[in-house]
Image (cartoon, rainbow, N blue to C red):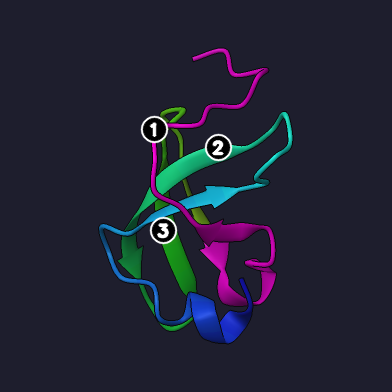
Amino acid sequence: MNKEEAETLKPGEQVCIFAGESTACSGTIVSCNAHGVEIKWDDGRTGVVLYPVMLDVEHYSGPPILPEASTR
């Protein structure tokens, strides 16, 4: 999604990063601020993604997606 789309995300929304790739992972928006979003990924990790670099993130609804190489 682009920066403008990312700025509309709300806590509780589901997203996926790198959809269709072996490193794809789904997660849930935890919090948002003026610079980006905090996401709790379904592989157990939590991270912050800044709005300008959200191009690999998209809205998602469905079962959890975990990276193929996930060790968790």
- Residue type, numbered disc 3: Glu
Q: Position of residue 67 (x, y in %)?
A: 61, 26
Which residue shows up at 43% across the image and 84% down it?
34
Would residue 68 be counted in the magenta stretch? yes
- Answer few, some or many: residues within 10 Å of disc 1's Cα (few below 14, many 20 plus, some between 14 and 19): few
Position above or below: 51 against 13: below
- Residue type, numbered disc 2: Cys
Q: Position of residue 48 (x, y in %)?
A: 50, 57
Tag 2 near tag 3, CB within 8 Å:
no
Q: CA distance from mark 2 to mark 1?
A: 11 Å
Q: CA distance from mark 2 to mark 3?
A: 14 Å
The stretch of residues the image draws in magenta is 49-72
Q: Residue furthest top?
A: 71
> Which residue is under mark 3?
38
> Which residue is under mark 1?
63
**Numbered disc in front, either 1 or 3:** 1
Position above or below: 72 against 21: above
Position above or below: 7 against 43: below
Q: Secondary structure at mark 2?
A: strand
In the image, taking residue 30 as reference, residue 44 lies left or right, namely right
Q: Residue 4: which quarter of the image?
A: bottom right
**Numbered disc in front, either 2 or 3:** 2
Q: Secondary structure at mark 1?
A: loop
- Answer few, some or many: residues within 10 Å of disc 3's Cα (few below 14, many 20 plus, some between 14 and 19): some
Q: Residue 38: which quarter of the image?
A: bottom left
- Residue type, numbered disc 1: Pro
> Which residue is under mark 2?
25
